[in-house]
Image (cartoon, rainbow, N blue to C red):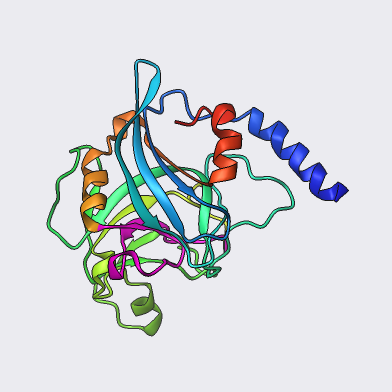
Amino acid sequence: MRAALAVLVLFAACARGFELPGDCRQCVVGVAPDWDSSHAEVSLWEKRGGDWERTAGPWAARLGKKGLVWGLGLHPVPEGVATKREGDGRAPAGVFKIGGAWGYEVDLERNPTLPYARITPNDLWVEDPVSADYNRHVRLARAPVTAWEKKQQMKQGDSAHALKLFIAHNAEPVVPGAGSAIFFHIWRAGGAKASAGCTVVAEQNLRRLIAAIDPAKNPVYVLLPAGEYRRLRGQWKLP
């Protein structure tokens, strides 16, 4: 009990020293009922005149089949708590930068400054923790030939991964085994299925989100259980 209390006190001290970047004017917020839920609501917020305003959503979303766990992003992580691990079936919680978009199409509706790359059979996203390219994109100069290369392919003939927006968990720096390939992508079975750790939404909502994201507004993704969101909202200056 004393150890748990000490962790909470330490995290409270760290949390008070953290807030969203001052130049962040766009924030995607995902809120789950609790740590073990695979369901969430996602909304897009923009800062206007110093105040946050919701500009899209809320949309239903699914998370990892086992819920959430602290991830590695911009936020402080409490000492002594579980954090995201490769294959744990949980979505990373915290505050994360939002990276580029990926898809099977030649192009799509988006802000012209948002990077977009068409996924080909030669594109890999490495999920092998022992690889030097773990949680990195690799584009081969040839078609994949080994079983390992084929396992890392981004294009798997799966419509759920036909459109993706990168969530920068465990990105800078990359910690081996701390979780990889975290994206917003299209949900399966109309939302009836949870993900392996990504945030998944209906295709039309993902397209709306990608079309709205503006890199000039330094967008971030905040994903938290409802209790943590309420507790940290004021301290972290969340929407």
Relative to 182, does residue 130 appear above or below in the rendering? Answer: below
Relative to 219, does residue 63 appear above or below in the rendering? Answer: below
Relative to 46, does residue 155 appear above or below in the rendering? Answer: below
Q: In front: 167, or 192?
A: 192
On-image quarter of the C terminus: top left
* Residue 154, image quadrant: bottom left
The magenta segment is: 177-202
> Residue 177 placed where, x, y %?
57, 64
Q: Which residue is drawn at 14% across and 46% down?
A: 109
- The answer to whether residue 57 of the structure is visible from this angle is yes
- The answer to whether residue 141 of the structure is visible from this angle is no
Relative to 164, does residue 120 appear above or below in the rendering? Answer: below
Q: In front: 145, or 207?
A: 207
Asked if residue 192 is among those painted magenta in the image, a careful observer would answer yes
> Residue 190 placed where, x, y %?
28, 66
Q: In this view, does 79 lie to the left or right of 219?
A: right
Q: Residue at x 27, y 35 (%)?
A: 214
Q: In front: 171, or 49?
A: 49
Q: Which residue is drawn at 35% across and 68% down?
A: 192
Mainly helix, strand or loop, the magenta region? Answer: loop
Q: Check the image and name the residue furthest to the top.
A: 49
Q: Which residue is drawn at 64% across and 45% down?
A: 77
Asked if residue 179 is among those painted magenta in the image, a careful observer would answer yes
Q: How many marks?
A: 0
Q: Check the image and name the residue furthest to the front.
A: 33
* Residue 27, image quadrant: top left
> Residue 187 placed where, x, y %?
31, 63
> Residue 218 placed where, x, y %?
37, 32
Q: Check the image and name the residue furthest to the left.
A: 106
